[in-house]
Image (cartoon, rainbow, N blue to C red):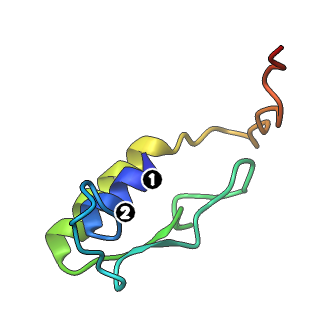
Amino acid sequence: ALGWAVVELGGGRRRPADAIDHRVGLDRLAGIGDVADAATPIARVHAADADSAEAAAARLRAAYRVGPGPAEPPPLIRARLG
């Protein structure tokens, strides 16, 4: 979800010929288990215009789940093949 937010901002390619806008992207992303409250940003969006910024912010809000306590990180290895 976050990668597609960057693509929609213009920071990634959908097709090989697409240009990349190096001014746009995401940083300061909140990690799994980070402590936050309503005043704590979950990320910073760098966008070329306000509409793109709002679209990326909507994707960010949809990608994160906020709960009453810290989340357990997922296992580093889900399964072994072979």
Q: Which of 13 and 57 is in front in this view?
A: 13
Give the image location of residue 55, x and y in percent: 24, 58
Residue drawn 52% across and 59% down? 38
Q: Nearer the viewer, residue 63 or 67?
A: 63
Q: Nearer the viewer, residue 24 or 64?
A: 24
Give the image location of residue 25, x and y in percent: 41, 73
Give the image location of residue 76, x and y in percent: 82, 37
Quadrant in which the C terminus appears: top right
Report whether 71 appears left or right of 4. right
In this rendering, the count of numbered labels is 2
Report whether 31 appears left or right of 47. right
Q: Residues within 10 Å of mark 1 (few under 14, many from 20)?
A: some
Report whether 29 appears left or right of 56. right
Residue drawn 40% across and 42% down? 62
Residue drawn 22% across and 67% down? 18
Give the image location of residue 29, x and y in percent: 58, 64
**Above or below, 75 relative to 25:** above
Of the residues shown, which amino acid type is indicated by label 1?
A: Leu
Quadrant in which the N terminus appears: top left
Q: Is mark 1 on a helix, strand or loop?
A: helix
Of the residues shown, which amino acid type is indicated by label 2?
A: Val
> Which corner quadrant of the image does residue 68 belong to?
top right
Q: How crowded is mark 2: few (under 14 residues within 10 Å), some or many (20 or more)?
A: many
Q: Residue 6 carries which label?
A: 2
Q: Name the residue under label 1.
A: 2
Image marks 2 and 1: residues in contact by CB distance under 8 Å: yes
**Above or below, 43 relative to 76:** below
Q: Which mark is residue 19?
A: none
* Residue positioned most to the top: 82
Residue drawn 80% across and 17% down? 81
Q: What element carries label 2?
A: helix
